[in-house]
């Protein structure tokens, strides 16, 4: 289900109708806002048009003139994968007038592989369309960016998020304004929030009563966060947003500075428990001021 991005969808449909489809596009925007869904829909419309048989093939993931490339288990797209793609592109389409390749998380293409891709972007076959999907536009080489048409995908509006929730009959116990803030204009983030409702409610309850907490309460909070190690960066993002929403009652800047320091240290592979303990100790100091 595609939500929002009406202007971009209309533009892509117009390009197809006017036979003005370019050879290379970059779909850029934060994770989870529908870039890949729209890229697939664009590819389907390019390849299949009104051909029902081809549409069925596409929907069943066996259209011979379409391929989706994704990062490997290590989170990269290596030069061997790109070389194989280039080899396949040189072969003319089997059933359609075009061949379409989507590279998801294109920022994960190694620099060596991006350089290998460059020649194809400079001199593409007339029938080839390559769509690079990324949330990290600046991670792509300048030479790649300069040879591709960029489409910027903006965060979804509050009304789009609510429409998606209603269309899928989701029942969420969180306050709607909090839910919208945590989703941050992204369906992908919304789904993560829905999957972590209990944790988020715990954070809300903790922040609501933080001025009443004692040493034991803060220790229990540190233990709770330590047990959430695998999802801790998302949880700390949620905690920041929840604290920010209480900005009239809390020293927001101080709390958030401790959270940001913890995130930075965790990503820097500093001992996890030390990072959490230091952050929670900082919270306790702010609360006692």
Image: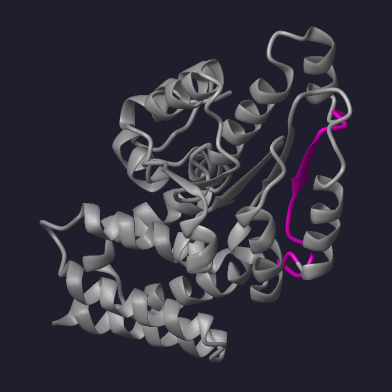
Q: Is residue 176 left or right of residue 136?
A: left
Find the magenta span and give its range. 62-77
Determine the residue positioned at 41% across, 61% down: 237
Residue 105 visible in rendering: no
Residue 108 horizontal side relative to residue 232, left or right:
right
Q: Quadrant of the N terminus?
A: top right
Image spot of residue 103 (x, y percent): 68, 50
Q: How is the image coloured?
A: one colour
Q: Is residue 92 above or below residue 19?
A: below
- Residue 285 at x, y percent in the picture: 24, 84
64 in relation to 52, above or below:
below
Q: Residue at the location (47% across, 25% down)?
A: 9
For the point 16% across and 64% down, the residue is 250
Residue nearer the viewer, 277 or 61 = 61
Q: Position of residue 141 (x, y in %)?
A: 53, 68
Closest to the observer, 136 or 159: 136
Instruction: Report whether 220 appears left or right of 85.
Output: left
Look at the image and tell me in which quarter the C terminus lies.
bottom left
- Res. 255 image quadrant: bottom left
Q: Which residue is nearer to you in this view: 56 or 247?
A: 56
């Amino acid at each position: 289900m595609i939500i929002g991005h009406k202007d971009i969808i209309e533009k892509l449909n117009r390009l197809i109708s006017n036979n003005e489809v370019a050879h290379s596009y970059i779909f850029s925007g934060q994770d989870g806002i529908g870039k890949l869904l729209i890229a697939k829909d664009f590819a389907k419309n390019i390849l299949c048009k009104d051909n029902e048989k081809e549409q069925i093939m596409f929907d069943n993931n066996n259209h011979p003139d379409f391929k989706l490339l994704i990062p490997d288990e290590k989170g990269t797209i290596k030069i061997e994968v790109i070389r194989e793609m280039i080899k396949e592109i040189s072969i003319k389409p089997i059933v359609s007038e075009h061949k379409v390749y989507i590279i998801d998380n294109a920022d994960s293409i190694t620099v060596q592989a991006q350089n290998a891709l460059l020649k194809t972007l400079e001199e593409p076959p007339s029938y080839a369309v390559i769509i690079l999907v990324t949330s990290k536009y600046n991670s792509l080489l300048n030479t790649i960016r300069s040879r591709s048409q960029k489409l910027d995908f903006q965060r979804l509006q509050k009304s789009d998020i609510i429409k998606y929730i209603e269309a899928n009959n989701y029942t969420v116990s969180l306050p709607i304004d909090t839910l919208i803030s945590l989703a941050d204009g992204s369906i992908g983030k919304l789904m993560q929030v829905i999957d972590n409702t209990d944790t988020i409610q715990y954070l809300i309850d903790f922040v609501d009563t933080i001025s009443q907490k004692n040493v034991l309460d803060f220790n229990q909070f540190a233990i709770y966060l330590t047990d959430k190690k695998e999802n801790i960066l998302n949880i700390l993002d949620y905690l920041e947003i929840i604290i920010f929403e209480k900005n009239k009652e809390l020293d927001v800047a101080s709390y958030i500075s401790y959270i940001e320091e913890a995130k930075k240290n965790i990503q820097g592979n500093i001992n996890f428990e030390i990072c959490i303990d230091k952050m929670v100790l900082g919270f306790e100091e702010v609360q006692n001021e």
